[in-house]
Amino acid sequence: MILTITLNPAVDISYKLDNFILDTVNRVGDVSKTAGGKGLNVARVLHQLNEDVAASGFLGGSLGDFIRSQMELIGIEDYFVQIGGETRNCIAVIHEGKQTEILESGPIISQEELLAFLEKFTGDVQQVDIVTLSGSLPKGLSTDFYSKIIEIANRHNARVLLDSNGALLKATLTSGHKPYFIKPNEQELGDLVNRKMMSDTDIIKALESSLFEDIPWVVVTLGADGAIVKHADTFYRAKAPKIEAVNPVGSGDSVVAGFAAGFARGLKDEDLIKFGLSMGVLNAMEEKTGRIDVAKVQWAVDQIQVEKMK
């Protein structure tokens, strides 16, 4: 089983407008509400790939109930911990080829709720092979919380795929407990090593930093330009096909889902890279976030080119 963790989930609300005008009333008829948060996007794609998947994190209030009902509806197992606070909303306004996001910070997690999660996770992780950690932390959790989760997972031989950024990612990578996989984009990688990435050579040089030692897989996503992947001491350059992107939101989460499924299926190197990245391509081709057309999986895999660099 694969366990996805979203510590700060949300109800994702999408408003699509032909024009978005500031300082006035904008009326919208095209509205969607989805059980969201990065880890839930991962879980949704894994479910579409017919992987055995459960979702965990913190849920509270009526919005938390909405997320639980959505997971039950599509068949994702609910491993969430109930909290006293209210789960957040996250709003995306899609307009004129742009996307403006309004993200609530979320509830404050108490010490009791924190300890209840760690206790439950210690039991849950013994039933799974792979754990994905995605997104930000709610208030009340310190930046070492992901490290605590990774420590427990490593102790029980569960591989952890981490998708985070900023101070949280750096704090986790500089701890004594390393994930199995990380997926920074080009800018996030630059932030980690304190310099701007100008070329593939810069990315490779950055990945040779001691910061990434003992992390078997590092996937640096480059949007439409594909990715540079480091597996142990080997580097790969992956190129994605040119597509007409309908909604790129959730493509990074879909890539995490693709790699998690690939690891679960025992895929190796080039095949794994193609499969993982193809999920991001397929998600970008769909209107809804965290969705893929499974009938096009082989097509997408075949379109991705992977070459060994070093």
Image: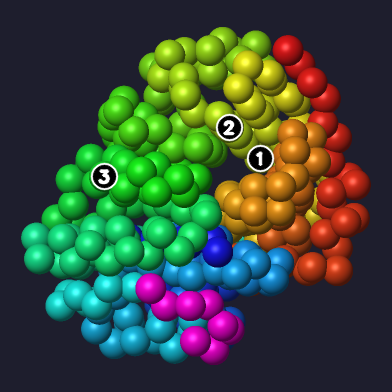
- Residue that mark 3 sits on: 148
Give the mark nearest the N terminus, 1 or 2. Answer: 2
Amino acid bearing label 1? Gly
Residue at 54 percent of width and 89 percent of height: 73
Residue 251, visible in the rendered structure = no
Tell me which segment is drawn in magenta. Answer: 72-79
Indicate which disc residue 259 carries.
none
Tag 1 secondary structure:
helix
Locate the N terminus and report the quarter of the image it occupies.
bottom right
Could you tell me the amino acid type at mark 3? Lys
Q: In this view, does 272 lie to the left or right of 107?
A: right
Q: Nearer the viewer, mark 1 or mark 2?
A: 2
Q: Name the residue under label 1.
A: 223
Identify residue for label 2: 217
Q: What residue type is labelled 2?
A: Trp
Circles 1 and 3: CB atoms closer than 8 Å: no
Q: Nearer the viewer, mark 1 or mark 3?
A: 3
Q: Quadrant of residue 68?
A: bottom left
